Amino acid sequence: MNIISGLIQNYFYFASIVIFLIGTHVMLTHSNLIKKIMGMNIMETGIFLFVVSIGYIRGGSAPIVPIDGRGVRFINPLPSALILTGIVVGVSLTAFALSLVIELYKYYGTTDSDEIMEMRRRER
């Protein structure tokens, strides 16, 4: 019963791990490059949720100092700021990966990585 109550109290950590594992599963089991990029984005979302969850404090407030300032617990703003940078990097990486997939499609006529590897073997 102790494990279940711990999962209920920290459901955001558990959810982030599940989201990350779903993305990992999609990347490893699909040969379509678009689906692999989608899996990578799902994995990024799990990581973003995990890092933001680290900075969360139950009962905390925004890090703006009130006038009296006594007994107030603040949420750590650093993980949220880092995740904003991570989101920008993730969007850039997705755009770059999609542009590579477009070029691969133009050259090979498919987005299936297994077919592309087979065509490359035949070229040699």
Image (cartoon, rainbow, N blue to C red):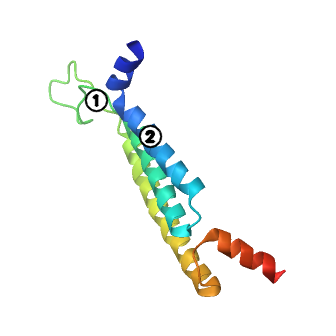
Vertical order, 104 against 52 (above or below)? below
Residue 111 x/y as whole percent = 57, 75
Residue type at numbered disc 2: Val
Q: Residue at x 31, y 28 (%)?
A: 57
Quadrant where the C terminus sits is bottom right
Mark 1 Cα shell of 10 Å, populated few (<14), some (14-19), many (≥20)? some
Can the viewer see residue 55 in this picture?
no
Q: Earlier in the sequence, mark 1 or mark 2?
A: 2
Question: Residue 105 or 55: which is nearer the viewer?
Answer: 105
Can the viewer see residue 19 in this picture?
yes
Residue 10 x/y as whole percent = 36, 27
Q: CA distance from mark 1 to mark 2?
A: 28 Å
**Residue labelled with disc 2:** 18
Residue type at numbered disc 1: Phe
Going by the picture, which residue comes out furthest to the left? 67
**Residue labelled with disc 1:** 74
Q: Could you say whether the residue bearing mark 1 is in a helix, strand or loop?
A: loop
Using residue 45 as the reference point, say whether residue 110 is left or right of it.
right
Mark 2 Cα shell of 10 Å, populated few (<14), some (14-19), many (≥20)? some
